[in-house]
Image (spheres, helix red, strand yellow):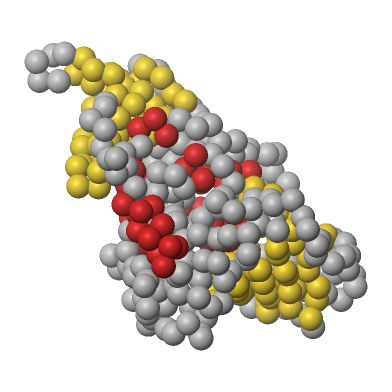
């Protein structure tokens, strides 16, 4: 069996790096409500491949058939690339399912933990599992 | 070939990642064979430990994620716990020794959800958040200057190792002024000249003032370990000096470009005035 060791090492490295939270969020709580999870299904209208957060915009149809445009915040491209994304991972017009947290200001904005496109789930670098973001709201403040 | 693959899989914990992780970004450029993390410290031509490389953090979170190892016990201010990005003093059982005004400031910043964190506004996050940041940094060591490039917010530090003294009355800078000298195998870095009301030491907002003298001790005891002991001596903000530890591991990859375009701030929600 011919095994390309380079690819094996790269895959191992990918696992190692993917286990480190890529988007320790500098002010997650200022923008999003960790207690308000949301799942949105919609078609992609725009992709912004920028820092500090890449963003996709999706048209979401509600129960009455009304369409609203939502802005979905992802991690940084630097981090997303290490989670298996490329800037071509989602295309305009494609249907995606977004899991995430709602914005506090009531706007059509959510921070995404994962995006499922073409049956493939991509983690998008939200700090939901990141203890450092949690730790910023803990600890003794003395005196 | 099977035996080599088994050996490789078995040593996933200690073999440093090699080659082509981001082959989509740059043409694949062959690196050397993987070096076990416990291998010898690389050295420069003048015999000093070589800190050069791309480094990622290895941290013990205060609040463990599901399935993670338990957090280490909290310690006194005379000991050296690991720092965390969200709360640099989270390893101290009584927290940081904040002056009263600084303690009030941290409470306010936490109530405001850290919306004024410079990092959240595409401004320099400062040396401590850079040390603790989960994104990578690249150290380039030359005989006269050590440069640290941070992927996060495209940060850049210079540590002059050419024997120059710290400046006497410098213009206050976000990064301050850093000089370093080798004491045996430890690079001892001193930084002064910080500007007031600029950097935060962590996401929750522990402050640093222009009175601060920061000492960092960089050690690379083996190939796979970078240990940075950071002592903050800032009598304006803290009642006594305190020291925390940052631990990093090398990775064989390159930094991505990260130019911060501030779009978040319009949605920030803080304490209503």
Q: How many discs appear?
A: 0
Q: Is residue B38 in sight in this rendering? A: yes
In the picture, the quarter occupied by the N terminus of chain B is bottom right
Residue A60 lies, with reference to residue B89, above or below; the image says above
Tell me: A110 left or right of B177.
left
Q: Which x, y percent locates residue B78?
A: 51, 86
Identity of the residue drawn at 23% across and 21% down: A60
Tell me: A99 left or right of B49.
left
In the picture, the quarter occupied by the C terminus of chain B is top left
A94 and B4: which one is in front? A94
Q: Which x, y percent locates residue A1?
A: 54, 56
Tell me: B28 left or right of B270.
right
Identity of the residue drawn at 59% across and 39% down: B258
Q: Which x, y percent locates residue B4?
A: 59, 68
Q: Which x, y percent locates residue B79?
A: 50, 85
Residue B52 lies, with reference to residue B25, above or below; the image says below
Identity of the residue drawn at 21% across and 42% down: A37
Q: Is residue B41 in sight in this rendering? A: no
Identity of the residue drawn at 62% across and 39% down: B257
Residue A8, by quadrant, is bottom right
B119 and A127: which one is in front? B119
Which residue occupies the extreme left position in the image?
A64
B258 and B23: which one is in front? B258
Residue A118 lies, with reference to residue B99, above or below; the image says above
């Amino acid at each position: 069996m011919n095994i390309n060791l380079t690819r094996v090492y790269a895959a191992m490295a990918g696992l190692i790096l993917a286990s480190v939270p890529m988007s320790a969020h500098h002010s997650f709580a200022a923008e999003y409500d960790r207690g308000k999870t949301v799942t949105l299904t919609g078609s992609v209208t725009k992709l912004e491949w920028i820092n500090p957060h890449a963003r996709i915009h999706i048209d979401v149809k509600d129960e009455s058939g009304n369409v609203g445009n939502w802005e979905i915040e992802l991690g940084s491209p630097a981090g997303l690339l290490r989670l298996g994304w490329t800037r071509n991972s989602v295309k305009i017009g494609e249907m995606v399912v977004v899991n995430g947290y709602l914005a506090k200001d009531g706007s059509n904005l959510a921070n995404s933990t994962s995006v499922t496109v073409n049956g493939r789930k991509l983690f998008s670098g939200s700090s939901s599992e990141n203890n450092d973001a949690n730790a910023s709201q803990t600890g003794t403040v003395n005196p | 070939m099977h035996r080599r693959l088994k050996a490789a899989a078995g040593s996933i914990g200690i073999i440093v990642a090699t080659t082509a992780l981001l082959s989509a970004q740059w043409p694949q450029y062959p690196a050397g064979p993987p070096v076990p993390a416990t291998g010898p410290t690389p050295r420069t031509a003048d015999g000093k430990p070589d800190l050069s490389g791309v480094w990622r953090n290895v941290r013990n979170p205060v609040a463990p994620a599901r399935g993670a190892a338990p957090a280490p016990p909290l310690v006194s201010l005379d000991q050296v716990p690991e720092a965390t990005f969200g709360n640099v003093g989270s390893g101290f059982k009584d927290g940081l020794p904040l002056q009263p005004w600084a303690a009030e400031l941290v409470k306010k910043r936490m109530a405001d959800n850290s919306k004024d964190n410079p990092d959240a506004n595409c401004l320099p996050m400062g040396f401590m958040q850079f040390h603790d940041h989960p994104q990578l940094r690249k150290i380039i060591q030359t005989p006269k200057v050590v440069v640290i490039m941070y992927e996060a917010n495209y940060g850049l530090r210079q540590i002059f190792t050419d024997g120059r003294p710290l400046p006497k009355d410098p213009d206050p800078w976000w990064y301050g002024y850093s000089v370093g000298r080798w004491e045996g195998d430890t690079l001892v870095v001193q930084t002064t000249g910080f500007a007031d009301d600029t950097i935060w030491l962590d996401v929750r907002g522990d402050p640093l003032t222009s009175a601060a003298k920061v000492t960092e001790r960089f050690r690379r005891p083996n190939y796979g370990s970078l240990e940075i002991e950071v002592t903050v001596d800032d009598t304006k903000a803290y009642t006594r000096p305190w020291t925390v530890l940052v631990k990093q591991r090398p990775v064989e990859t390159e930094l991505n470009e990260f130019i911060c375009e501030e779009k978040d701030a319009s949605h920030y929600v803080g304490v209503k005035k």
